[in-house]
Image: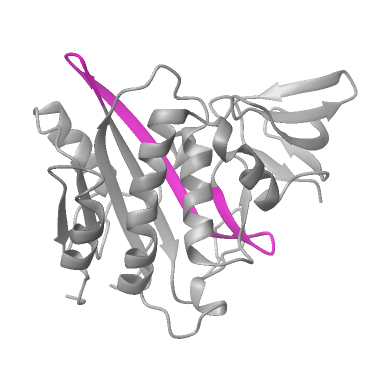
Amino acid sequence: MLRWPAEAIWEAVAPVLPGFTVEVLPQVDSTNTELMRRARAGRLEPVLLVTEEQTAGRGRLGRQWNSGAQPGEVLMFSLGLPLKMADWSGLSLAVGLSVVQSLHPELQLKWPNDVWLADRKLAGILIETTQINDTRYAVIGVGINITPRDGVGLATPPAWLQELEPGITAPLALERVAAPLARDVRRFEAQGWAPFLSAYAARDALAGREVDLSDGTTGQARGVDGSGALLMHTSGGLKKISSAEVSVRPSK
C-alpha cells in the first residue's frame, strides 16, 4: 500500500470534527457505498475513508464510475459525517469549490461540481445522504485523477493533477484537500451557500458560455443563484436548473 498521511490528516481535522477517524482500505466496491452501509447500520461517526482501488464506483445521475486505475493513479475517498441544517441547497457546489481551491489556481468548476482543467474533467464529486432516526448523515465522495488517464469511452476528455504539478501523488493531494474540505462543510452547515457564492463565480467554467442540457434545452450560462441553481438564458427567458434534473455541457 501507499504511505498515506492518516495521522497528519487526523490531527488537522479532529478539532473540527470531534470523534473523527481516518481509514485506508486496499480495495472496496465504493467508498460512498461502504459509508452508506455503515450509516444504515447505525455507525454515524465522522470518518474519512480512502481506498486504493474501487470495483463498483458510482457517479452522478446513477452513472457507473470505475477508475480502472492502479493504486495511486486516482485519489478516491469519501468523507462521512452527520450534518444538521435546514437548507442543503448548494452543498455540492461548496464541496467542489473547496477541492479546486485546495488543489490549484488554474482549476475551474463545471456546474454543479465537476473539477475541470481546460474543459477536461480532472475530478468528480458525488454526495449522498441517509436519514437515521433524527440524524441526517452525509457521504461526500471525491475522485481525483493524479496521473495520465485514458479517455476512451469517456464523454469528457480527462485531465490529471500531474499536468499542473508533476511531482504530486495521491497521498499528497489527499493531505492538501482533506482538512479544508472538513472546515468548508462545517462552514456550510453553519452559514449555508451564500458565503461561497462569489468564490464560486471566480471559478465558474461555464459562465457566459453557450451550453446544452441533456433535455435538449440550449442557452447561455449566467452563473448560479443563491440556492446553487444554474441560471441559464434561453429563448424562453431566464431558466433555473437544479442538479437533480439534467446534466449540462458547453455547446460545440
Which residue lies at the image location 37% right of the left edge and 77% below the top edge?
A: 169
Instruction: Give the quarter of the image for residue 112.
Output: top right
Q: Which residue is outermost to the right?
A: 235
Residue 30 appears in the picture as rendered = no
Return the x and y of residue 45 as percentages of the image width and height: 14, 37
Task: Determine whether 209 is above or below 100 in the image.
Answer: above
Task: Determine whether 217 is above or below 186 in the image.
Answer: above
The magenta region covers 114-136
Most common secondary structure along the magenta stretch: strand
Task: Determine whether 178 is above or below 1 in the image.
Answer: above
Which residue lies at the image location 45% right of the left edge and 76% below the top edge?
A: 147
Return the x and y of residue 129 as percentages of the image width and height: 31, 28
Which residue lies at the image location 44% right of the left edge and 46% below the top edge?
A: 125
Return the x and y of residue 53 as percentages of the image width and height: 26, 63
Q: Which residue is outermost to the bottom?
A: 167
The answer to whether residue 58 is left or right of residue 152 is left
Asked if residue 122 lies in the magenta stretch, the reply is: yes
Residue 248 appears in the picture as rendered = yes
Which residue lies at the image location 47% right of the left edge and 55% below the top edge?
A: 99
Number of numbered discs overlaid on the protein picture: 0
Q: Nearer the viewer, residue 55 or 146?
A: 146
The answer to whether residue 218 is left or right of residue 28 is right
Asked if residue 247 lies in the magenta stretch, the reply is: no
Return the x and y of residue 54 as percentages of the image width and height: 27, 57
The answer to whether residue 213 is left or right of residue 124 is right
Instruction: Name the colour scheme.
Output: one colour
Point out the image quarter for the N terminus.
bottom left
